[in-house]
Amino acid sequence: MRAFESVHFTATAPGVRLIVTGAVHGNETCGTVAIRRVLDDIEQGRLAIVAGEVTFVPVTNPLAYERGQREGERNLNRGLAPTPHPREFEDHVANWLCPLLAQHDALLDLHSFRTPGEPFVLVGPEDNAGALEPFGHAAREAGLAVRLGVHRIVDGWLGAYAGGVERRRARHALAGTSSRNMDADFGVGTTEYMRRSGGWGMTLECGQHDDPRAPEVAYRAIVQTLAHLELIAAPNPPAATRIDALRLCHVVDKEDAGDRFSRAWASFDPVRAGDVIATRRDGTAVRAEFDGCIVFPSPNAEPGQEWFYLARPTQRFAT
C-alpha cells in the first residue's frame, strides 16, 4: 500500500485553516510542482506562516501520479466520500483525504486540463438552502477567486452534473442497463466535499497539462491565497478588474466509442444555438442548445462518461 503524504504548518497566532492539494488526478502535476516550490520557500525562509494553519498535499493520488495518468483505479474526484469497505485504491485515498479536508476551513485544489486554453477557477454556488448544495460561504469564495491571478470564474458544476444524471438515468432506463455514475452525488469531488463539511474552497484549473506556464500559475495562486487569508505577512493581492464569469448549464455524455466531435474543441470556444458540436455514431448531430461556450471537451472520454459541458455568461461576479 502506498503511503499518503501531507505537510502541515501551525503558527502561534490564530487564523484560517487552509489545505492545498495537488495531483488529485495523477497526470495533472502543476500543483505538485508549485506546492514543492512553496515548501522549499518555507524551508529556506523566503516564506513564513505567521497565522493560522496550512496543510500541503503535493500528491493526493499517488497511484495515479506514479502511473502518470488521470486515475489509479477510478476517478478520485467523483463520488468522493469515505467508505467502510474500500475496494479500489481511490477508496483508500478518500478514507484518508476526507477527514483531512474536514479539519480545515478552506481548500485550494490545483488542477490542469487536456485541451489548450487559459486558466480559470471553479467556485461553488451562491448562498442557498437548497437540497443539492446548500452553502453559506459564497462571499469568501468570491473574495479569493478574484485574487488568484486569473480572469475567468466558472460556477454551476454540481447543478449541471445533476441535470446530466437525470438524462443518463432516462437513457439507461430505456436500454435496461445501469451505471455507477447515475447518482447526482457522483459529481461530488474535493471542493463539494469541503462545502458539505462546513468549509469552502475552489478548484483552480491552471492551464493545459503540459503548458510550462501552469506550475507558475499554481505557485502564484498559492502565494496569493496565503496572503489574502493573512497566513503570511504580505499585502492582500488586488482583485482582478476584468472578470469573465460563466455558469455551467448542461453536460453531454459520450454514448458510444464511435461518437466524434465536429472539430478539435478547446475549453471556452464559443458556440451558437444550433451549432453542430459532435456527431453520434448513428449520424445524429449533437447541437448547442443555446449561445455560450464549450467547457471540458474530452475527445478521449469513455462511453458513459462526460464528453463536454456547455456554459453561458452570468452577471454573478460583475463589478
Image: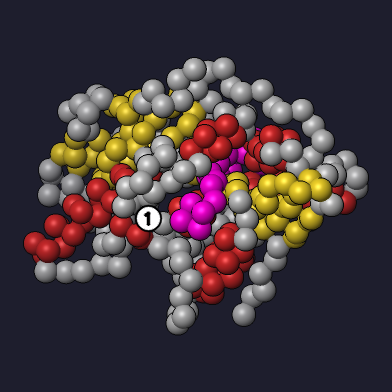
Q: Residue at x 53, y 44 (%)?
A: 202
Circle count: 1
Q: Is residue 217 above or below residue 134?
A: above
Between 28 and 185, the one lying in front of the other is 185
Q: Is residue 25 left or right of residue 160?
A: right
From this viewpoint, is residue 264 visible?
no
Q: Is residue 50 left or right of residue 248?
A: right
* Quarter of the image where the N terminus is located: bottom right
- Residue 23: image location, x then y, percent: 59, 55
Residue at the left extreme, as displayed? 174
Residue at the bottom extreme, as displayed? 85
Which residue bears the numbered disc 1?
187
The kind of secondary structure element at disc 1 is helix
Mark 1 closeness class: few <14, some 14–19, many ≥20 residues within 10 Å: many
Between 173 and 73, the one lying in front of the other is 173
Q: Residue at x 31, y 52 (%)?
A: 131
Q: Is residue 213 magenta?
A: yes
Q: Residue at x 74, y 38 (%)?
A: 230
From this viewpoint, is residue 229 visible?
yes
Q: Is residue 120 left or right of residue 46?
A: left
- Residue 126: image location, x then y, percent: 41, 37
Q: Residue at x 48, y 38 (%)?
A: 138
Report the span colored magenta. 195-215
Kind of residue at badge 1: Gly
Q: Is residue 99 magenta?
A: no
Determine the image quadrant of residue 279. top left
Q: Is residue 178 above or below residue 42?
A: below
Between 207 and 202, the one lying in front of the other is 202
Q: Is residue 123 left or right of residue 309?
A: right
Between 64 and 3, the one lying in front of the other is 3
Residue at the right extreme, as displayed? 45
- Residue 156: image location, x then y, percent: 37, 40
